[in-house]
Amino acid sequence: MSVRSKLKIVVTRRLPDPVELRMRELFDASLNLDDRPMTRDDLAAAVRTAEVLVPTITDRIDREILAQAGPQLKMIANFGAGVDHIDVPAAIERGLIVTNTPGVLTEDTADMTMALILAVARRIVEGAELVARGEFAGWTPTFMLGRRIWGQRIGIVGMGRIGQALARRAKAFGMSVHYHNRKPVSSAVEAELDATYWESLDQMLARMDFVSVNCPHTPSTYHLLSARRLALLQPHAVLVNTARGGVVDEAALAALLKRRAIAGAGLDVYENEPVIHPDLIGLPNVVLLPHLGSATVEARVDMGERVILNIKTLQDGHRPPDRIIPALL
Ligand code: 8YV
């Protein structure tokens, strides 16, 4: 591809100002300044005109949308790390490159995971809501007791970048780190984190005090935490999910929480966002956030820069660095 021509890019949502400014300078950019989510028709029109589509998690780029792509479409440069809203195999079949934004939201997502662990165990939201209602009637020795996290076992499902960043935090809080992954991490990382590998997810789940979901959502992790596996959790266990709702059977989780078969949950992601299973709402032992894992100014600018790097590399005639390889999903 020639170096001179600017690629035509279509960005589906409003991005931070510095990112949009840079995109305008570097590319022939069509931006979504009023941030209205794109309809299926809008997306179909976008893939008929764009050379690069920049979607987010709110856009479902499935086989049907991809079938409408014109021959000019070269790449889908996702704004975000997770790509479960894109049919990556279908895109690759069509000769498209798919990229994501790894690495730049790791620490913020791990922070949010830790925040949820603390919020549920120490009843932070419940306490703050009580004060906001004007109901703080004074300290007592037995008032609003939570659970200590120091010395507890955390089981991390998925020990990639975010899992490891969480493990570092958990260790600093005095937790003992356990994990399940397709394969163990290097012995150097295991040693740094004092982490114990569990080949059997079932066995790990049955022995943890806290369980955190940190793996990507793929066909092989869909409902990895199934009703059967969730039932293995101990009654005092807390489940936290900042990865993707689809990894957990949300209805089964809601049923367990409702009958207090586990102690609590902290969720930032849901199976059918923005819809949340109604039985999860209003439970005192559950903290629900609106998908805020990477919602810092810094992460969103860095994500935008990563998208720009991928597109600029393509524009300059090279292979973008953050290509998704379906076999590794
Ligand atoms: C993003 C995320 O905000 O990057 C991801 O995978 O889940 C979020 O933190 C979102 O995906 C942006 O598209």
Image (tube, grey):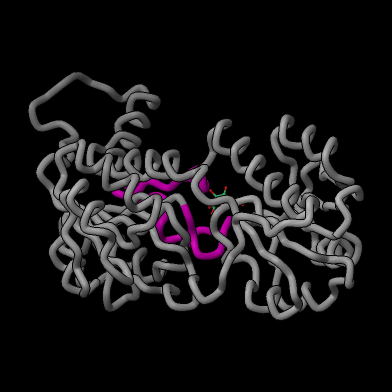
| Displayed quadrant of residue 23 | top right
Can see residue 263?
A: no
Would residue 282 appear left or right of 123 to someone viewing this image? right
Q: Where is residue 95 shown, x and y percent of the image?
A: 75, 75
> In the image, is residue 36 above or below residue 182?
above
- Quadrant containing the N terminus is bottom right
Query: Is 284 contained in the magenta span?
Result: yes
Would residue 123 appear left or right of 102 to someone viewing this image? left
Query: Is 10 contained in the magenta span?
Result: no
Instruction: Depth check: give the residue in front, 165 or 31.
Output: 165
Q: Which residues are magenta?
A: 269-293
Q: Where is residue 14 shown, x and y percent of the image?
A: 74, 41
Q: Give me the residue at 56% from left, 74% from top.
A: 326
Q: Give me the residue at 27% from left, 22% from top.
A: 136
Q: Give me the residue at 58% from left, 50% from top.
A: 101
Can see residue 169?
A: yes
Number of residue marks: 0
Instruction: Depth check: give the residue in front, 313 or 174.
Output: 313
Q: Where is residue 155 shown, x and y percent of the image?
A: 23, 58
Would residue 140 appear left or right of 162 to someone viewing this image? left
> In the image, is residue 106 above or below residue 184?
above
